[in-house]
Image (cartoon, coloured by chain):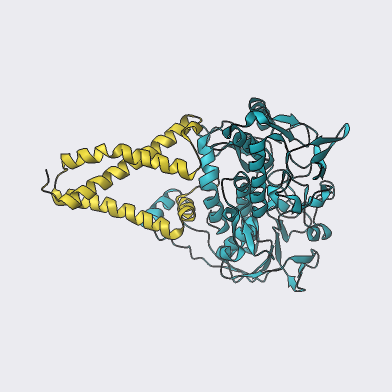
């Protein structure tokens, strides 16, 4: 790969999703992250109850991310051919798990409010 | 030659993103190359991968240049997608976009082909009769598929009676899939192979063979299908280490390799194919055949006398310096993409590496400097070995493997990540390349 720079990656992602969708997805991810920071600051504490639900939802996020990637690339789990494949798959699962957990925490915090302990 | 030139000293700012800017600065690529002011007349022949990307790059780099792009085709084809279409994984529309959608402002697109080319007078005549004088000519016409060289074959046959030919275009690739689908349902003898000329993506005939095997296996019909691959010489692939790996995989998958077999004729009614071999012609029956014809430079390029005079005489690839891609007899001409007479690399990945070289030598000369970029023969071939796995094979003029991710993605291992790249990342990268952004 020649000249693999951050600018190239942005260009490739824009082409992958379409410019509008890519930046919309980026904005949604930034918004959810921002809301997460907002509820943490608002509540001045991490709610263990909400965190528990967020943790319990992690496998759903992990499996959802794996399912999505396999589905859009006509792949199956049996296609994993070497350690790098499993590492990539684990990375996809991790991103799905953490992303979904943050989403679940934020949604709980916004819907139930800070008092729900 | 172009009029006297001045450099504009302004450096372009970082891209608008703060984060992007920081990362770019860290990677040392933050500052874009300066724009060069010129009145040069540049003609680009062909709006395929090379011509389109070069038009975008030159529009970014040059100020005041007259850039003219000549190509009659209204459709742009993403050719690396043809294999996926022919395997039923994508529709024909996956590979089709509009030529006009990729072209930058400031470039004039003439939707005509070149009818004549005079490299001494530095003039191109279009099929519509326009005469274009140029200071620099970038030949990016691509190549011509010589279907007539296969006796008894015509494109009308594709999609019937077991005849497939996915090189012919997206629609033909889809018709080819219908035949492959029928063949892997019913079983029988499937014939594959490649021409004896240089060809675009020498891995593609092998990929479709592997995919046919995989599709038959998935349908539970593998034992009803007999597959034979016909190589034009004693190897399956020009890089020896890759040849041996492919031979091993063919053995494992039960695909027969027939060496020194070149398809010369088919009889569609009798379903027979004839191959030229050192021992004479061999005729064999088939239930499915994938036809890939000999490939040559377009007539107008051959007639202009741009080709090598001591090699590829029947094919006409243009005589360029293998390192700079500049024509050896006509320095105002560059060869870009499939048309370049270099020993490796008629792939989109090679185009990606041709682009900065041609851009550098052209723009440097306009700016009064000498270009320094060189092309080392880099070619990449995501060798699909089944749906869901590929080998990311990259190599250079010296037949060295040149992996982009050494120690991480093994080039001769069948990996899902290599498939991911082919399936999900290649087209966006190609599109970014067309826009001059990758």
Chain painted in cyan in the figure? B
> Relative to B401, does residue A43 appear above or below in the rendering?
below
The residue shown at (56%, 49%) is B90
Q: Quadrant of the C terminus of chain A?
A: top left
Q: Quadrant of residue B412?
A: top right
Which one is nearer the viewer's eye here, B417 or B360? Answer: B417
The residue shown at (78%, 37%) is B232
**Would residue A97 appear left or right of B310 to someone viewing this image?**
left
* Rendered shade, chain A: yellow
Which one is nearer the viewer's eye here, B172 or A18? Answer: B172
> In the rendering, at what x and y percent does residue B161 appear?
74, 45
Asked if residue B319 shows in the view, the reply is: no
Asked if residue B6 shows in the view, the reply is: yes
> Relative to A42, does residue B235 appear above or below in the rendering?
above
The residue shown at (47%, 63%) is B12
Q: Quadrant of residue B254?
A: top right
> In the rendering, at what x and y percent does residue B76 appear?
62, 59
> In the rendering, at what x and y percent does residue B62 appear?
58, 66
> In the rendering, at what x and y percent does residue B43 appear?
69, 66
Q: Quadrant of the N terminus of chain A?
A: top right
């Amino acid at each position: 790969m020649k000249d693999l720079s951050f600018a190239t990656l942005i260009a490739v992602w824009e082409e992958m999703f379409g410019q509008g969708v890519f930046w919309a997805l980026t904005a949604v991810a930034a918004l959810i992250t921002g809301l997460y920071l907002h509820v943490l600051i608002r509540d001045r504490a991490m709610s263990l109850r909400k965190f528990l639900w967020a943790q319990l939802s992690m496998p759903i996020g992990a499996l959802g991310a794996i399912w999505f990637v396999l589905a859009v690339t006509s792949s199956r789990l049996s296609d994993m051919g070497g350690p790098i494949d499993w590492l990539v798959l684990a990375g996809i699962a991790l991103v799905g798990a953490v992303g979904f957990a943050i989403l679940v925490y934020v949604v709980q915090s916004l819907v139930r409010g800070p008092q729900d302990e | 030659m172009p009029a006297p030139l001045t450099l504009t000293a302004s450096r372009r700012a970082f891209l608008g993103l703060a984060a992007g800017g920081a990362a770019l600065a860290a990677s040392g690529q933050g500052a874009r190359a300066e724009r060069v002011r010129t009145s040069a007349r540049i003609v680009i022949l062909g709006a395929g991968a090379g011509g389109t990307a070069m038009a975008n790059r030159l529009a970014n780099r040059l100020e005041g240049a007259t850039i003219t792009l000549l190509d009659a085709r209204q459709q742009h084809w993403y050719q690396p997608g043809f294999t996926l279409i022919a395997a039923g994984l994508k529709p024909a529309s996956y590979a089709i976009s509009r030529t006009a959608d990729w072209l930058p402002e400031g470039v004039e697109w003439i939707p005509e082909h070149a009818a004549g080319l005079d490299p001494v007078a530095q003039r191109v005549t279009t099929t519509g009769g326009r005469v274009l004088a140029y200071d620099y000519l970038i030949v990016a016409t691509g190549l011509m598929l010589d279907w007539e060289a296969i006796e008894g074959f015509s494109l009308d046959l594709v999609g019937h009676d077991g005849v497939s030919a996915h090189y012919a275009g997206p629609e033909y690739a889809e018709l080819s899939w219908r035949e492959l689908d029928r063949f892997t349902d019913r079983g029988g003898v499937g014939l594959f192979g490649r021409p004896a000329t240089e060809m675009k993506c020498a891995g593609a005939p092998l990929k479709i063979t592997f995919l046919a095997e995989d599709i038959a296996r998935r349908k539970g019909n593998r034992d009803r299908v007999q597959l034979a691959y016909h190589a034009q010489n004693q190897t399956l692939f020009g890089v020896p280490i890759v040849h041996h790996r492919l031979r091993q995989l063919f053995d494992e998958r039960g695909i027969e390799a027939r060496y020194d077999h070149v398809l010369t004729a088919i009889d569609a009614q009798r379903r027979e194919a004839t191959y030229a071999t050192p021992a004479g012609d061999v005729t064999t029956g088939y239930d499915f055949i994938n036809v890939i014809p000999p490939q040559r430079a377009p007539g107008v390029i051959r007639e202009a006398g741009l080709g090598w005079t001591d090699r590829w005489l029947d094919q006409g690839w243009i005589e360029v310096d293998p390192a700079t891609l500049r024509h050896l007899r006509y320095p105002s001409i560059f060869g870009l993409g499939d048309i370049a007479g270099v020993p490796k690399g008629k792939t989109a990945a090679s185009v990606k590496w041709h682009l900065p070289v041609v851009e550098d030598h052209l723009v440097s000369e306009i700016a009064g400097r000498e270009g320094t970029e060189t092309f080392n023969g880099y070619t990449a071939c995501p060798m699909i070995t089944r749906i869901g796995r590929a080998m990311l094979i990259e190599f250079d003029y010296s037949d060295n493997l040149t992996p982009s991710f050494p120690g991480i993605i093994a080039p001769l291992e069948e990996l899902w990540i290599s498939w991911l790249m082919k399936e999900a990342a290649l087209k966006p990268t190609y599109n970014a390349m067309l826009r001059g952004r990758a």
